[in-house]
Amino acid sequence: MKHKVIVNHWEEICEDDSCYEYGTSIIVNGKELIREASIITALKAVLEEIGADVEIEETVESEKCCDSLRKKNLDY
């Protein structure tokens, strides 16, 4: 079965222009899975929705790269 995955970039402005929000939603086979997606949560949601059994490992390419990412305690 071929699955249809849509990566939808959206923005919303309050009626009085007092706020502005934007994000990315993930839609699989017509079902919105996530409204505000990071790359990891989006990937996990898509793979889970299509029934794929995978292990996702996030790495940092360089010791000097991405210190802020390494310092975060990310719970995926």
Image (cartoon, rainbow, N blue to C red):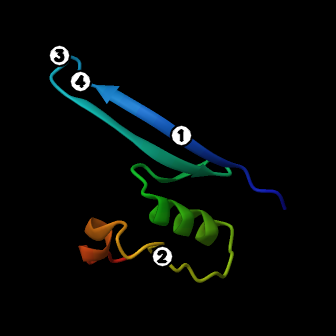
Q: CA distance from mark 2 to mark 3?
A: 41 Å
Vertical comparison of 51 with 25: above or below: below
Callout in the foreground (4, 2): 2
Task: Determine the residue positioned at 52% across, 80% down.
Answer: 57
Q: Which residue is mark 4?
A: 14
Give the quarter of the figure containing the N terminus: bottom right
- Looking at the rendered image, the disc whose residue lies closer to the viewer, 1 or 4, is 1
Which of pointers 3 and 1 lies earlier in the amino acid sequence?
A: 1
Circles 2 and 1, Cβ within 8 Å, touching? The answer is no
The residue carrying pointer 4 sits among few (fewer than 14), some (14 to 19) or many (20 or more) residues within 10 Å by Cα, namely few
Q: Nearer the viewer's eye, disc 2 or disc 1?
A: 2
Q: Are marks 2 and 3 in contact (CB under 8 Å)?
A: no
Please state if 51 lies on the left or on the right of 62 as rendered. Answer: right
Asked if marks 3 and 4 touch (Cβ < 8 Å), the reply is yes
Q: Are marks 3 and 1 in contact (CB under 8 Å)?
A: no
**Number of residues whose C-alpha sits closer than 10 Å to that of mark 1, classed few (under 14), some (14–19) or many (20 or more):** few
Residue at mark 2 to residue at mark 1: CA–CA distance = 23 Å
Location of mark 3 (residue): 16
Circle 1 sits on which residue?
Answer: 8
First of labels 1, 4 by sequence position: 1
User: Residue placed farthest to the top in the image?
Assistant: 16
Secondary structure beneath dot 4 equals loop
| Secondary structure state at the residue bearing disc 1 | strand
Residue at 58 percent of width and 49 percent of height? 27
Identified by mark 1, the residue type is Asn
Please give left or right for residue 67 compared with residue 42 in the image. Answer: left
The secondary element bearing badge 2 is classed as: loop
Between disc 2 and disc 3, the foreground one is 2
The tag earlier along the polypeptide, 2 or 3, is: 3
Tag 3 secondary structure: loop
